Image (cartoon, rainbow, N blue to C red):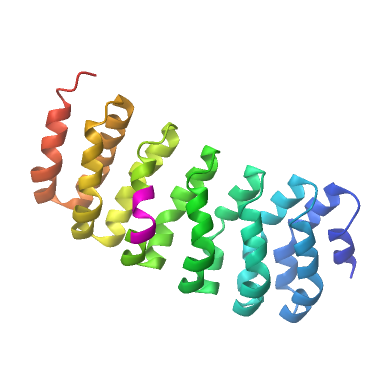
Amino acid sequence: PAYVRLLRDNEAEVRIAAAGKVTKFCRILNPELAIQHILPCVKELSTDSSQHVRSALASVIMGMAPVLGKDATIEQLLPIFLSLLKDEFPDVRLNIISKLDQVNQVIGIDLLSQSLLPAIVELAEDRHWRVRLAIIEYIPLLASQLGVGFFDDKLGALCMQWLKDKVYSIRDAAANNVKRLAEEFGPDWAMQHIVPQVLDVINNPHYLYRMTILHAISLLAPVMGSDITCSKLLPVVINASKDRV
């Protein structure tokens, strides 16, 4: 087909344009035809010499999962997702992360935790702060799908770690993240798993981290309710008012 020729064009600009439309094109095809004709090209594009081609593909490839169905996604798309998540170019990684929710419901929780989660945990410490930020913004959705038990085991420590990131935008997003997790799992869970760890950081020698914790407390207070706020959070805020900074 003509579209396949465009995906394999000699000019990178043509491949970029064609790659960006791959999901839309698959939607108008029979899934079997898409698997037979388009998927081989997608596999080639995922290792294209041009980072911009890979980035264009990464921005849309997740949308192919609902179109192709569970079996084809697991067998053929998932390995491509994982390779793009490890791409050397940060925008490629970023584009995959920002669309991860599109594949969650297709592959199911078990496979999500086995295949994608290790890559997500690795990216949580990515050297590019925008990649770390994208992971943080994805965490509440991931938490709601994985459930509280799995979240505690695998992701809880990361959420605390981000509160002490060297980049302000990450610390700010991390504070919002703990609030959203408290909303998702409830005040009792937050009191056990979030509040003690958050309050521990208030004694950190770095004043910027102490400021982040005060911001997190202000976000947590409405979620936690008046009793916990008055008994646990307010004393910390009052004490911080005497901070040397």
Residue at image position (23%, 34%) is 202
Magenta span of residues:
153-158
* Residue 59 appears in the rendering: no
Horizontally, residue 127 falls left or right of residue 92, namely left
Horizontal side, residue 129 vs residue 7: left or right: left
Label tally: 0
Query: Is residue 3 inside the magenta stretch?
Result: no
**Quarter holding residue 62:** bottom right
Q: Is residue 196 left or right of residue 74?
A: left
Magenta segment, principal secondary structure?
helix
- Identify which residue is drawn at 52% across, 49% down: 123
Report the residue at 54% width, 44% height from top. 131
Q: Quadrant of residue 203?
A: top left
Query: Which residue extends farthest top?
Result: 244
Q: Is residue 232 visible?
A: yes
Q: Is residue 181 above or below residue 238?
A: below
Residue 60 is drawn in which quadrant?
bottom right
Asked whether 114 or 65 is in front, the reply is 114
145 in relation to 183, above or below:
below
Q: Is residue 56 above or below residue 129?
A: below
The image quadrant where one finds the C terminus is top left
Give coordinates of residue 33: x percent, y percent: 78, 78
Reply above or below: 149 against 20.
below
In the rendered image, residue 187, in percent from the top left (x then y), is placed at 20, 57
Residue 151 rendering spot, x and y as whole percentages: 36, 61
**Quadrant showing the N terminus:** bottom right
Measured from the top left, where is residue 242 in percent x and y? 14, 22
* Residue 156 highlighted magenta (yes or no): yes
- In the picture, measured across the screen, residue 115 lies left or right of residue 18, that is left
